[in-house]
Image: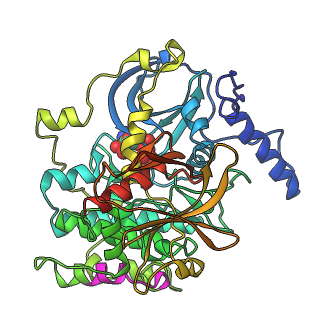
Amino acid sequence: MAEMVEGEGEGEGIGEMEKDVDSKLRIQNNNVGVPRSKSFAFRAPQEQFTIKDFELGKIYGVGSYSKVVRAKKKDTGNIYALKIMDKKFITKENKTSYVKLERIVLDQLDHPGIVRLFFTFQDSFSLYMALESCEGGELFDQITRKGRLSENEARFYAAEVVDALEYIHGVGLIHRDIKPENLLLTTEGHIKIADFGSVKPMQDSKITVLPNASSDDKACTFVGTAAYVPPEVLNSSPATFGNDLWALGCTLYQMLSGTSPFKDASEWLIFQRIIARDIRFPDYFSAEAKDLIDKLLDMNPSKRPGAGPDGYTALKMHPFFEGIDWKNLRGQTPPKLALQSSVAEANNGQVSKWNHSHVGDNDGSDNATSSSEATSHVTRLASIDSFDSRWQQFLDPGESVIMISMVKKIQKLSNKKVQLILTDKPKLIYVDPTKLMLKGNIIWSDNPNELSIQVLSSSHFKICTQPKKVMSFEDPKQRAWQWKKIIEGLQNR
Ligand SMILES: Nc1ncnc2c1ncn2[C@@H]1O[C@H](COP(=O)(O)OP(=O)(O)OP(=O)(O)O)[C@@H](O)[C@H]1O
């Protein structure tokens, strides 16, 4: 069993994360009365390595709270995808529970279609997860490079995703962020599902999770990506396996057409199209592909193939998958990978060499994560409490809520909890949530000189109106960037 790594002072809570994971598991095990050894043994051990034990190569990608870099262990020569998370940033952004959850869930998953976690380690500044390296990149890039995929290529990839999803759902987990960016490829071209930071364990999940590491929907700001979000999530329904099947339908559509089915100019327009189930199939889709996508994009999550009482049989037996050898998927030859075509793409893909001084104990001033923060919030979607009937009284007939948050209005003398509501009129108001009284109407303007949003952190933002009126808000669900994005989206509609 691996030794537990002690925290090193920096980033309280996160520094102690692995130790904390260990102690929580002991408590949990005691509760159910299962005699255990002194502590829980991770399959992927917590090692005492340092970043200097690795030769770092290109950056594979940047997530909302991490960077993933290709890394060769100097003594063994083994290659990993090293996911590097800044402790201070995770603590500041309240992402500790997501990190813990991803670590503990990945540790227990064992399927050829899921990225493997080999070991973890940490130093004063960062947490590191050594993941199986997917040298073929993202499925998203294959779609971009090829324009769109052939039905045979899409069938192969979709079948491998179905196979891995059957396993994930079988152990009682909902992934909640299935999309071409999170479907990685091996050198040979087989699919590996990555990014378990949004995972939701069901009540009867076979996966052990910590009491405080499970993703609580109320506190959760990460529940998927706008283009792939199912309509029931927009209506604040509880998560089900059907969520992933909807996202699979969107992904299959994207493989075959090159774009996601509800793509539009703004998140708001995307949501409107999802709620209206506004799908248009290109003529060149086969009848079988159309039928499968149509069924996966059923408004009723329990009717989607794979979510019904017969489990995955309905999905795997669908005519689109005719000819698929489900028992020997990994023995088949995958579609040929399209290689990176230009220097421009290479530069976009950040293939530059990793700068050692940016990580580890060398230098604590690494702030590159804040740029990823800015971009990632653009694609991430917070849970939406949008259609609560209590707010209807503040709307005109036919007017609907686009975004709503219980926020703190920060004032000189006291802070007040208010419900901030943005409607499609557009109208921006705040309401006393207890007395259900209108407290303010922020005069709408499409002109950014007259109405603008300033984001101070993921939870703090200011709404500035003319003449020089500034209101400060704190959104505990950390949707400051989303407020900015959605208001600016409406101004530019
Ligand atoms: N095992 C891996 N092998 C190769 N590349 C990887 C691997 N894991 C992640 N990546 C690349 O790094 C990028 C960032 O991954 P990471 O898991 O940190 O972010 P993310 O969780 O997908 O981001 P976000 O949380 O913002 O969606 C991915 O989009 C992918 O391109």
Left or right: 85, with 58 as reference point:
right
Position of residue 329 measured from the top left corner of the image (x, y, whole percent): 34, 62
Magenta extent: 291-302
Question: Which quadrant of the structure image shows residue 155?
Answer: bottom left
Chief SS of the magenta region: helix
- Quarter of the image containing the C terminus? bottom left
Residue 251 visible (yes or no): yes
Residue 193 visible (yes or no): no
Q: Nearer the viewer, residue 64 or 104?
A: 64
Colour setting: rainbow
Residue 291 drawn above or below residue 207: below
Q: Which residue sits at x=40%, y=27%?
A: 71
Q: Is 134 part of what is drawn in magenta?
A: no
Position of residue 131 measured from the top left corner of the image (x, y, whole percent): 47, 38
Left or right: 493, with 391 as reference point:
left
Position of residue 165 measured from the top left corner of the image (x, y, whole percent): 45, 65
Q: Which residue sits at x=26%, y=30%?
A: 351
Q: Which residue sits at x=17%, y=38%?
A: 345
- Quarter of the image containing the N terminus? top right
Q: Nearer the viewer, residue 462 or 403?
A: 462
